Image (cartoon, grey):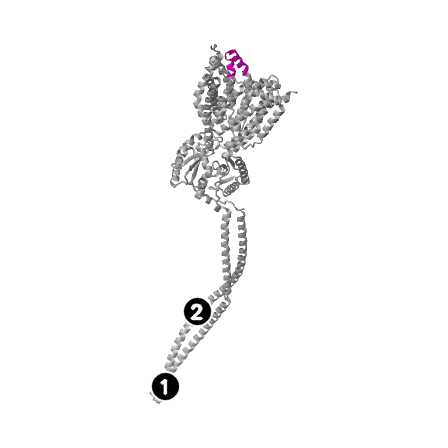
Amino acid sequence: MMQKKNTLQIASLITWFILLVGMIILLPNSLSWNSSFSQQLPTKDAPSATIVYTNSNGTLSTKQRKAIQENQKKLKANQKFLGLKSIEAGNDSNAAHRLNSTDKSTELSILHFKESQKQFHILIPQIYSLIQTTGVHAYITGNDVLQIARVQATQAANKLVIVISCILIVLILGLIFRSVLVPLITLLLSGIIYLSSFSIATLATRFLSMPYTAYTNTIILVVSFGLFPIAATVFYRFYCDHYENQNAVRKSYWDSWLPTLLSIVPIIALSSLLLLARNTTLRSLWILSVSITLVWIAFYTLMPAFTEFLDDLFFWPGNGKSLNPSFSFWHSSAILGKKRSLISLISIFILVLLVSLIKMTPLNWSSVVDTPFSSQAKVGASVITSHYPVGKVSPITITLTNKQPITTTKNMATLNQLTQKLKANKNVANVYSVAQPSGISLTNLYVNKQLASVTSQLSAANLNLTNTQKSLKKSQKQLKNLNLTSALKQLSKNATNLSKIQSQSSQVANQADELTTDITTMQSQQAEIDRAIRSGKTSRNSTGIQRALSSLSTHNKNLISDLKTLRHNIGVVSSNNNVIADNISQVEDDQQSVTDDFDKVQSVLKTTGVALTKDSKNVQIAQQNLIGEQSYLDNLSKSGILNVLYMTSVDLRTDPMKNALSQFNESNNKETTISVVLNKTTASIKATSTLKQVQQLTNATLSGTSLSKSFLHYSGETVDVAKKQQALNHDLTHLVPWLIGLVILYLLIISQSLFAIYASISLLITFWGGLQLTNWFSNLLLKTPLLADVPIISGLIVSCLSLGILIPIILRTTRATTDNYLSAINFFDPLLILIGIMTLIPLLALGFTQLLSFIQIALIVFISQLVWGLLFPIGITAALHLSYDKN
C-alpha cells in the first residue's frame, strides 16, 4: 500500500514538472542555440572555403571546364547573398598554376568571405548545391569547413549516444531487476537531468557568453545517461532489499545526502575552475559542475517521491531481489596486498615501468581524422591531398597590414625577398604572394635579370666604342693626308699670277694707245701719199712713181686696216683686262679671306688632331674600364646579391599584376596576404614547428625595412593547432597541477591520512596507463594517435568515476588504519559488478558511434577503470600496511 503522500515530495514533483514543461517549451530554442554555438568557428577571422572539382576518369574536358566556369558565374551572381569577398578561380593566369592539378584532372576555387560568419555552417550546404556539375565530382572543403563537419559529426554522435544509452539502460536494468518501471524511471530522471543541463548550458552561453562546444553536450549526456544510471543502480541495489521498510529508505536518504554531497564537491569545484583554462574545449566543460549538481538534486528530490509514490510497485512486475551477486575480488586483493605488501608494490612498479616503455606519440590535432568518411568535406580534402601538396587544404596565411600602400618598389622587393626565404624552408611546398602570384619568381623583373640587359647594352656600347676608335683613327689619317701648306702656296701663286695679269693689262692698254697714235700717223702719211698721187697726176710725173705711190697707198691702207683690226682686238683684250683688273681687288679680298680661313682651319685641324689622339686614348681607357665593369657586373649578378625584385608603377599596371593585386591585396593596397603551402600535414608537430620558423623568418626579413612596423596576422589550421597546443600546454603546466593539488588537499582534509596521497597516485598512474595503452592500440589498429581533445574529456570522466568511489571509502573509515580502509573497500565488493556493467553503458554507446574521438574516450575510460579496479585494492592496502602497521 502506498503511504500518505508527503507534502515536500509533492512540491518537488510539481516543481520539476513545471521546470520540465518550461524546458520542453524552450527546447526548440535550445536546439537552435546548440547548433549555432557549437558550430561557431574558434577564431574571429573571416572564413574561407575550397571548392574541389575533379574528374575521377582523367583530365577535365573542355565541356566540363565550361560547366565549372558556369558554376563560378552562379557563385559570383550570389556573391553578395553568400557574403563572399572574392573568388579565386583556376581560369585566372596567376591562379592557374596553384589551383589546377598537374594531371589536369582537378581544379580548385577559393572562396574568401567578407567577415566572421556566425552562420557559416548554414552557407555550406547552399554553396554545395550551387557547385554541383554534371560529369564532375564537386566538394567544398577547407580548414573552416572541416571544423564544421567535425562538429556536425560530433553532434550526430551525441544523438546516437543518447539513443544507444537509452536502449542499453532499458535492456540492462530490465534484465538485472526484472522490472519495467526501473529503467523507465531511470530514463525519465536521466532525461530531466539532460534537459535541465542542456537548457542551462545554452541559456548561459546565450546570455552570459559562457564557452560552448560540441563536447559541452557530450559531457552533459555522459553525466545524464552514464554517471547518473550508475549512481541510481547502486541505490536500486540497496532499495530492493529495503523497499518494504520505507522508514529505512527514508533514513538512507537522510544519512547519504551529506556524504554524497561531499563526494561531488571536488568535482563541482574542479569543473567550475575549468573556466580559468585557456583551452576552449577544457573551458566548455564547465557544465560538468551543473550536471553533477542537478544529478544530486534530482536524486534527492525526485527519487524519494518515486519511491514513496510507487512503494512496492517500484520493481514491478518483479521484486528486485533476483540479483544477489557474491563477489569478493577487492577483499581478496586487499588481503593479498596486506600479506605481500612489498612484493605487490614491486610488481605494480614493474608493470608501470613496462607501460612507460610504450612510446607516447604526439596528439593528433587534425579535424579531418575525426570526420566521417562519408563527409563531402573529408572526401574533398582527400582529393586535394592526392593531387596537391599535403598542406594545400589549409595553408598558413600571413596577413600584413601597413599604414601606407605596400606597392612601392622597396616594399615589393621586401615581400619578394620574404617569399623567396619562406620557399627555402624544406617543409614548405610553395609560397604565393603579390610578388609571386603564381608561386614562381618574376625573373624578368629581377635586378640581376635587368642587369643582364644592362650588361648586354654595355657590350653593345663597347662595340660602338671600338667602331668609334676606328673612325677616329681614320679621321686622323685623313687629317694627315690634308696638304694645307701646298694649298696655301698654290693660292699665293695664283695671287701673283693675277698681279702679273693686272700689270700686263696695263701694258696692253699702253700698247693700244701707242697703236692708235701709229694709226693716226699712218693715216696722216696716207693722206700725204694720196695728195702726192693726186699731185703727180696733175704734174704728170712718171708713171713708175705713180705706180709706186699707188702701191704704197694700197699697202698703207691695208696696213692701216690691219692696225685698226689689231687695235680693235687690243681694245677687246684691254676691255677684258679691265674687267679682270676690276675683279682683282675682289679676288684679292677673297684671297685674303680664304687665306685667313685656311689659317683658322689649319689651327682647328691641329687642335682636332690633338683631340682625336686624346679621344682615341680615352676610348681605349673606356674600353678597358668597360670590360672590367662588365666582368664585375657579371660576377655580381651570378653571386645572388642582386637577386632582388625591382617592380615599378608601370609594372603594376600590367594585367597579370592587376589580377595579383585584386587577389592578394585589400584596403587600397595597405593589406596583403602571403599563402604558405606546407608539404607536411598541417596539424602535425612538424607543421607547428615550421610555423614558428615562418614567424621568426618573417619578423627577421621585415626588420629594418619600411614594413617593419606592419601588423602581422597568421591564420590557417596550423595556426589554430599551434594556438590550441599553446593553450593546452599552459593549462597542463599552470592550471591542471593546481586542480590536482586541490583535489589531493581535499582528500587529505577529509581522510587525514596518507590514503589521500596513495589513492591520488593510483588514480594518476592508472589514467596515465590508460592513455599509454589506448594510444598504442590506436596507433596499432586505427593507424592514428590520440586526438587532442580525448585526454581532456576522458580525464574528467575517469575523475568522476574514481572520486565517486574513493570519497565514500574515505567517509566510511572512522580511523586511519589499514583494517578500517580494508573494511571500507570490502563494502564495494558486492557493487563492483553492477558498477562495472553500468559503466559499460556510456562506453559502449560512445564506441558504437564509430566516431574516432568517442571510441578513444571509451577505450581510455575502460582501460583506466579496469586497471584501477584490478590494482587499486592490492596497491592501496600494501602501501597503507607499510605506512601504518608496525608488524
Q: Is residue 244 magenta?
A: yes
Residue most extreme to the bottom: 542
Front residue (pair 186, 831): 831
- The label number, if any, that marks residue 549 in the structure image: 1
Q: Position of residue 568 (x, y in %)?
A: 39, 75
Q: Residues within 10 Å of mark 1 (few under 14, many from 20)?
A: some
Q: Position of residue 445 (x, y in %)?
A: 48, 46
Q: Mark 1: which secondary structure?
A: helix
The answer to whether residue 362 of the structure is visible from this angle is: yes
Front residue (pair 351, 125): 351
Marks 2 and 1, the one that precedes in the sequence: 1
Q: Position of residue 719 (x, y in %)?
A: 51, 34
- Label 2 to label 1, Cα distance in Å? 47 Å
Q: Mark 2: which secondary structure?
A: helix
Residue most extreme to the right: 886
| Picture quarter with the C terminus | top right
Q: For the point 46% across and 44% down, which residue is it?
A: 651
Q: Position of residue 710 (x, y in %)?
A: 52, 37
Tell me if residue 245 comes above or below residue 847 in the rendering: above
Front residue (pair 810, 562): 810
Residue at image mark 2 = 582
As drawn, is 824 to the left or to the right of 482? right
Q: Amino acid at mark 2?
A: Asp
The answer to whether residue 10 of the structure is visible from this angle is: no
Q: Amino acid at mark 1?
A: Leu
Give the label, 2 or 1, closer to the camera.
Answer: 2
Range of residues picked out in magenta? 236-256
Q: For the point 44% across and 70% down, which residue is it?
A: 581
Hey, which quadrant is residue 355 in on the image? top right
Main SS class of the magenta portion in the image: helix
